[in-house]
Image (tube, grey):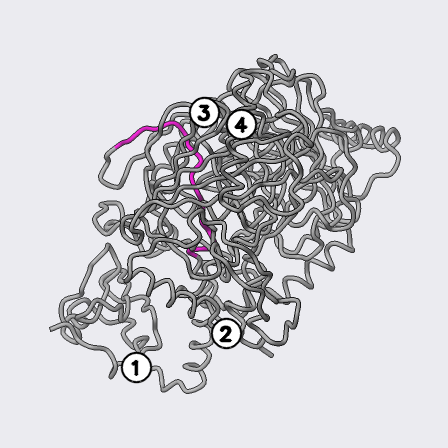
Amino acid sequence: MRHRALIAVGSLVAAGLTIGLGGIVAAGQAASDTTAFKVPASTYTPPKTPWGDPDLQGVWDNHTTVPMQRPANLKGKRTFTDEELAARAKARGDNEPLCNQNDERCAKATVAELDRLRAYNSFWTPQAYVYDNRTALIEDPADGRIPPLTPEARAIQQAHLRRHPPTDASAAVIEIRHWEDYDLAERCIAAQVPTTTMGYNSAQYLMQSPGWVMLAHERLNTRIIPLDGRPHLGGTMGGWMGDSRGRWEGNTLVVETQSFTNTQSGGSVGAVADPGIPFGNFHVIEHFVPVGPNRIQYYVTINDPKTWTRPWTFMQPWEKDRVLSYSDNLGAVETEPYQIYEYACHEGNNTLGNSMRGTLQARQREASRPPDAELTRSLIGKTEAEVRALYGEPTVIAGPRWTYGTADGILQFWAFFEGGKVVRVRPDDIRLTEVEPNR
Amino acid sequence: MRTQASRVLMRMALVAAGLVAVGQPAQTQGGAIPRTSWDKKPDLNGIWQTLSTANWDLEDHEGGPSPVFVTGAWGARPPGLSVVDAGTIPYKPEALAKRDQNRKNALPGTPGRNLNADPELNCFLPGVPRATYLPHPFQIFQSPNRMWMVYQYSYARREIFMNGKKQAPIDSWMGWSNARWDGDTLVIDVTGQNGQAWLDRAGNYATEAVHVVERYTMIDRDHIMYEATIEDPNVFTRPWKITLPLYRRIEKNMQLLQFRCAEYVEEFFYGEFVSPPRE
């Protein structure tokens, strides 16, 4: 009892001391917050370019599963042991995206698993992560959490979310009214700067020429960074990616970015800020710290007192010129050095138009909807035999999902079974009289 | 000596082709060709742009009104002489008919993502050589055994393979670029284009069989003479060539700026599909 009381007093004293040293501290911040974070110096001297700059050229991958923020259940734990990492990798393997209908794991999946696994075949998301044993990317604050938003930023975010409710893949109905309901990356405009791992195609080509650095992210962004000390562009001239200026500090490339577009549509894949976080006032400082021939520690500090109650810093390890291996669903493995390919995103983007048209049609259908008993949703609760009796043999059976298509291959509906009965139908508002049985 | 001789030859060729534009700076005016410190090859690093109107039409074209009347003289077409060495493009008869059809479809006048229209109208990637003569600057990054070209238009860019020939693994909008030096000329062999890009707003086009050989020759410090030979047995009776100078953007603190045109066509593509907010 007495012991515990002492500990509590001890941490109060520590917190009080830090507050005293640091001056202004907002409520709820960790005790260590007030000391300015210092990016470590490089521990490796790279070769030099002919014009004397450190040579960091090559394809740098930052593929990782380490989350930006430390999960609550890992509070106080900075790193995993190798055994813990191995166990986590094994668990992750079971969650591999599928869902090729020939895949055995897919066939065995439950409805809930199928929802989670449906997104991509596994070659999209190579499980070749850059080694990192930390539990969060955030280095500062020490608790690994993004600092609280200012009241002003919170109000802007809430207003944004009212206009553009977040699209939640698990929600029963996803309604896309407007193209701005999608984020920047889905609209094929840009990824937010700074950019973290994107799930696939996470690498960037770092190219140097005298006085310049160019970063070609495989997905969307090409950042051109002058090193000649010129002033920043004014206003919002930097656009979605901001306006970057670089310099060498020893072997470390330091890039400062500002003058961002002030339109609120953040939260894209790989973005550090959630949707609706205003980023027009971001001042981003990146440190590319060489720590080995093929490794950079990429530190990013985001300073925006209008948005967050204090600056914060995250670090991602980057690895150069990796040789990746890909396996398809049948287990064939191919290897190749990481090559940046064309990412023609907008050219093939039918998502925006199709989902908006889908919303229009869904609303029209909703307005003139017959009783549930006349719709495909009335199949819920029916057994496999009952569904077969009504519509014949399904066109495709993939695990719990039965597909009924027309003779010319158009999807009519999906029925999802659990415990031998239909638990869900998609779409569930098709008139039964319009369904063409498979006979 | 050799450089001097080739300049004279080039000048003669240009004069013969009627391509020396009024006001083009004398070739000695811009100073000696900059060379890299590492291999003494021409140093192409810099920001470049055409002053031609080839993007409107590679061939001779008169000035003309805006295709959309409400844009008045803002949208008017600037006139220009052909950048095609032989004046006109040697189409096969059926391909010429397709070109003329393209020209009719180039600007459909109705909203929506229209795959028969000029791909530039949709903000699609421009392909090669069109990327070079879009009315936007582009930047060349050159270092030992590495080269990239980044275009201001959309997110167009190319890695130029300087280090051995690589095969295009799959067709793409911007194709696959293998380069070599021919004396002081950078020669880029471009294959693997998907044939969906057009060559200009006037409907000139090639197919996925197109093979483009580009030649970048610095004629002084601030000018590159750009040539592209275009070969495609599906549509042309023989290979043909375009020639146009590229000018260095010498403005103080010049840099490429944001032109993310995907954003500029959203209303055009999707405006008709917007649903009102729910009460």
> Which chain's residue wears label 4?
A
> Which region is colored magenta?
A333-348
Circles 3 and 4 on the same chain? no
C-alpha gap between disc 3 and disc 4:
33 Å
Instruction: For marks 2 and 3, give the one nearer the viewer.
Output: 3
Residues at badges 4 and 2 in contact (C-beta under 8 Å)? no
Residue marked by disc 4: A318
Instruction: For marks 4 and 1, give the one nearer the viewer.
Output: 4
Disc 2 is placed on an element classified as: loop
* x and y percentages locating residue B145 in the rendered image: 48, 22
Location of residue A283 by image quarter: top right
* Residue A132 visible in the current orientation: no
Circles 4 and 2 on the same chain? no
Amino acid type, label 4: Trp
First of labels 2, 3 by sequence position: 2
Look at 68% across and 20% down and name the residue there. A40
Amino acid type, label 3: Trp
A335 within the magenta span: yes
Quadrant for the C terminus of chain A, please.
bottom left
Disc ID at residue A431: 1
Residues at badges 3 and 1 in contact (C-beta under 8 Å)? no
Circles 2 and 1 on the same chain? no
Amino acid type, label 1: Arg
Residue marked by disc 3: B181
Disc ID at residue B109: 2
- Left or right: residue A394 versus residue B179 is left
Instruction: For marks 3 and 4, give the one nearer the viewer.
Output: 3
